[in-house]
Image: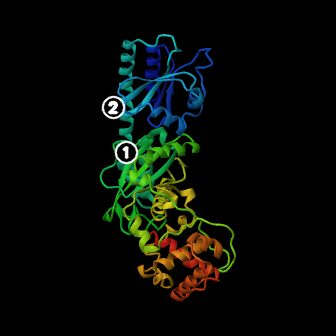
Amino acid sequence: MKGDYQDLVDEISALLGAPATLENRDFRLIAFGAHDSDDDLAMDPVRTRSILTRQSTAAVRSWFEGFGIARATGPVRIPAAPDAGVFRGRICLPVRYRGIVQGYVWLLDQEPGKPGPEPAALDAAMEVAQRIGVLLAEEAKAGADLSREFLAVLTAGRGWQQDMAVAALRAALGPGGDGLHAAVCVAPWPGEAPASVPGAAAVCVVPRRGGGEPGGPAGPGAGSGPGPGSEPAGEPALAVLLRLRSTDALAPALAAVTRLLPRAAQTTGTGGGNAGSGGGKTGAGGGSAGSGGGAGSTSATAATAHRVTAGVADPVRGLADLPAAWEQAVASARAAAAQPRFGPVAQWSAIGPYRLLTALTADPVDDPAARTLLTPAHRELARTAEVFLDCAGQAGRAAAALGIHRQTLYYRLGRVEQLTGLDLDEGEDRLLLHMALKASRLA
């Protein structure tokens, strides 16, 4: 497939007499033509970075998209902008298939005062761009067509069944199966899988099975997966297997994932704060601190019940570790739904204590000590306790974060101790309560 793209890019270069580059719609480089010009302006910073790193920055992408290239059906001329690192103007040929943009062919425009390509040559180049669009769409569809093999890997359970499923997916992916991949979970996901996801090797919809977790009876890491006769329960999740050229390519690849989320999820506000259970109950703290708090269990669950979030696993090479990577992706999506400060797309490497909390079995918050505190009647006390623990037990920081007097904080913490029977001067009691409060967001 790579050779086909290169041949078509070279054909466009010959038609227009200028070196061309092909990028997908996420501005990741696919192919580029030979460049033998002595003109220093031709290899400006934007073009050089695109070729050397095989991708463009978000700022460059935003700047070019501002000229309407994603909506255009014909060539778009973009003027030079030295301040943006574009020393020579560009001609962009949108690559479309059935009206959907698949990528872009870029050419250097002629210097001011010199005639550009003839209209007939541009028309011929656009016909070649349409052929590229067909190839890109077919490649994306091939990934979607692997949904059965991909789903089998995620739901086969442990042992020989999983080994066979992984072998089948590797065979279907060909040489690319041994490359670098990242698993992504988007949940909840109503309906069918999208026709294509840029940069994806495979996509599928995973039924949410018993215990409320997609692809497992009691959540990631909880023993073997469901058997073939398991009945789906709850809402499904979308699974995406992203192809990566390097671990550094994960961030731009996530742009495609973000666009899968509803607009409301993409613009959800975030909170602040860090989890922790150290420090003393009455220890003085300095300055202000963002709280990881928010409301207690009931309100947090209600607020995030319908929030679509995505989780991204650490990249893995090959497919042997894909089932474990899926567990990480599911856990990260759950953490994003439970804690808005992670944002709508959470990475496994950034969710902290939720890496352990999401691995708990069903009903992890039903601890007798915290049961009364986690009722709606004591929502404010639960929030106070969570902020206090998020602030590492530093009363000054917690009072500032809550916007209350320190004596009010002490009164509330005393009520928390009465309701729970826990001593917040004891590290293990504090740890138990902190875990219960955080886990309640996952209920």
Looking at the picture, which amino acid does disc 2 mark? Tyr
Badge 2 density bin: few <14, some 14–19, many ≥20, Cα 10 Å: some
Judge the density around disc 1: few (<14), some (14-19), many (≥20) Cα neighbours within 10 Å.
Answer: some
Q: Nearer the viewer, mark 2 or mark 1?
A: 2
| Res 272 quadrant in image | bottom right
**Would residue 239 appear left or right of 82 to someone viewing this image?**
left
Q: Mark 2 or 1 closer to N-term? A: 2
Which sits in the foreground, 318 or 46?
Answer: 46
Tell me residue 217's x, y (percent): 40, 67
Residue 2: x and y in percent read: 47, 29
Up the image or down, 291 lies above or below 265; here it is below
Which residue sits at x=49%, y=65%? 221
Q: CA distance from mark 2 to mark 1?
A: 21 Å
Please name whichever residue, 32 or 319, is drawn nearer the observer in this view of the structure. Answer: 32
Amino acid under label 1? Leu
Residue 97 placement: quadrant: top left
Residue 137: image x %, image y %?
Answer: 36, 34
Give the side of residue 228 with respect to residue 157, left or right.
left
Under circle 1, the secondary element is loop
In the rendered picture of this protein, how many numbered marks are placed on residues? 2
- Compared to residue 352, the image places residue 384 above or below, namely below
Q: Which residue matches tag 1?
A: 146
- Which residue position holds label 2? 97
**SS at badge 2:** strand
**Looking at the image, which is closer to me, 443 or 81?**
81
